[in-house]
Image (cartoon, rainbow, N blue to C red):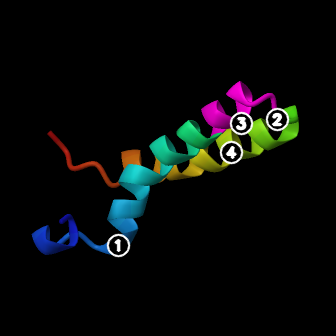
Amino acid sequence: MLRRRGWPVIRILTRLGPGALMIVALRLALTEAAWPWIAVALALSFPLHLADLRDEPER
């Protein structure tokens, strides 16, 4: 659906990636996974979040 609107794949990933990785971190925390795995998921979401903020149009 987003590709039909003309969004490039990288923009879709920067929009949806941080949230998806935070959901993965939440699932890992709820299933009592080892803390390094939770930290990895959260650490990977941060650069994507920054990329999303950088691509945000000026208002």
- Real-space Cα distance between discs 3 and 4? 9 Å
The residue at which mark 2 appears reads as 33
- Bounds of the magenta span? 25-32
The answer to which image quadrant residue 53 occupies is: top left
Disc 2 + disc 3, Cβ < 8 Å: yes
Q: Secondary structure at mark 4?
A: helix
Q: Is residue 6 left or right of residue 30?
A: left
- Front residue (pair 27, 9): 27
Which residue is under mark 4? 41
Q: Pointer 4 and pointer 1: residues touching (CB < 8 Å)?
A: no
Q: Nearer the viewer, residue 11 or 16?
A: 16
Residue 46: where, in percent of width, then height?
59, 43
User: Reading the chain from its start, which is encountered first: label 4 or label 1?
Assistant: 1
Looking at the image, is mark 3 or mark 1 earlier in the sequence?
1
| Disc assigned to residue 9 | 1
In the image, what residue occupies the spot 80% across and 43% down?
37
Inspect the image, locate mark 1, and give the three-letter code of the amino acid beneath it.
Answer: Val
Judged left or right of residue 44, residue 57 is left
Could you tell which of marks 3 and 4 lies nearer the N-terminus?
A: 3
Residue that numbered label 3 is attached to: 28
Against 3, is 59 above or below? above
Q: Are marks 3 and 4 in contact (CB under 8 Å)?
A: yes
Question: How far apart are the two marked residues, 4 and 2, measured between alpha carbons?
Answer: 12 Å
Q: Nearer the viewer, mark 2 or mark 1?
A: 2
Is the residue under label 1 in contact with that under label 2 (CB below 8 Å)? no
Callout 2: 10 Å neighbours few (<14), some, many (20+)? few
